[in-house]
Image (cartoon, rainbow, N blue to C red):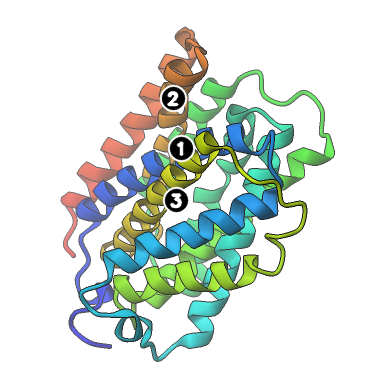
Amino acid sequence: MTASTGAARTNNALGALFILLATLCYASMDAISKFLVADYAVGQIMWIRCALIFLFSWFIVRRRGLVGALRTTQPWLQIVRSLILIIESAIFVLAFRYLPLADTHAVAATSPLLVIALGVLFLGEKAGPARWLAVAAGLVGVLMIIRPGLRTLDWPVLLPLIGAALWATYQILTRLAARHDSADTSLIWAALVPLIATTFVGPIGWQWPTPFAWILMALISAIGAVGNYALIKALDYAEAGAVQPYNYTLLVWATLLGVVVFGDVPDGWTILGAAIVVASGLYTWHHDRGMPG
């Protein structure tokens, strides 16, 4: 491992800033995906998205060149984490066809708890009472935002549950990859492998997008590339468990986008829940900044 890799410098506060940017990007992607999945096949959306994300990611790492950015000592780790990313993304896009954005994210809110547990088990990270308390408080805020929640356990509810488990696994593998590779390397692998994988399913059920749909797909891909890079940088600087409370801000961004895009004005309970989510993140920020390394 070289000194330039993320594991050599832990900065949980900086990692939190990158997570906030990543969750904003992902919430924006989800809102656009819900529009697109109503008219286009999931495989087609993912294929186009992966192709454009690859181009945007290549632009980000162009200073090293494609071959240089792809150079890694852990190719199988990069392949597995990248395949998990595309499967997880496709599952959530499919979930948006059947479930509201809010309900989907409510079920997916189990992911931070899974990351902390997996980080302790596989990365040797420590999760003290303060970190667990922040995650629990964030979960309470999520429940307030989503109440009364899903009333029946229909099969589509299983989609975000599976997606949450895969998302947690992806974050753990990304943190593990940061011990060996730079953020540029992880980014380009996470763009190239999904592109190759989706090429086998993208043409199935192909429907030529309208000009407006092309614009949305280009936008979602640019946002996705920035979001992926921000997440990789977050896990480059910070422990996987340290940044999990900030993942709940995805619900805050989703609520704000619901107001702006869909006209869903939040009520008092939603505002209170969002305040608790933000407070839990700020509490963890303060706690981690007061701790050495």
Among numbered discs 1 and 2, the one appearing first in the sequence: 1
Q: Nearer the viewer, residue 11 or 52?
A: 52
In this view of the protein, can residue 67 be seen by the observer?
yes
Left or right: 44, with 4 as reference point:
right
In contact (CB < 8 Å): disc 1 and disc 2: yes
Q: CA distance from mark 1 to mark 2?
A: 8 Å
| SS for dot 2 | helix
What is the three-letter code of the residue carrying label 3? Ser
Q: Within the image, what quadrant is residue 74 found in?
A: bottom left
Dot 3 alpha-carbon crowd within 10 angstroms: few under 14, some 14 to 19, many 20 or more: many
What is the three-letter code of the residue carrying label 2? Leu
Residue at 51% across, 29% down: 142
Q: How many marks?
A: 3
Residue marked by disc 2: 257
Q: Quadrant of the C terminus?
A: bottom left
Q: CA distance from mark 3 to mark 2?
A: 18 Å
Residue marked by disc 1: 27
Residue at 26% across, 64% down: 237
Percent across and percent down for residue 205 are 77, 52
| Residue lying furthest bottom | 73
Among numbered discs 1 and 3, the one appearing first in the sequence: 1
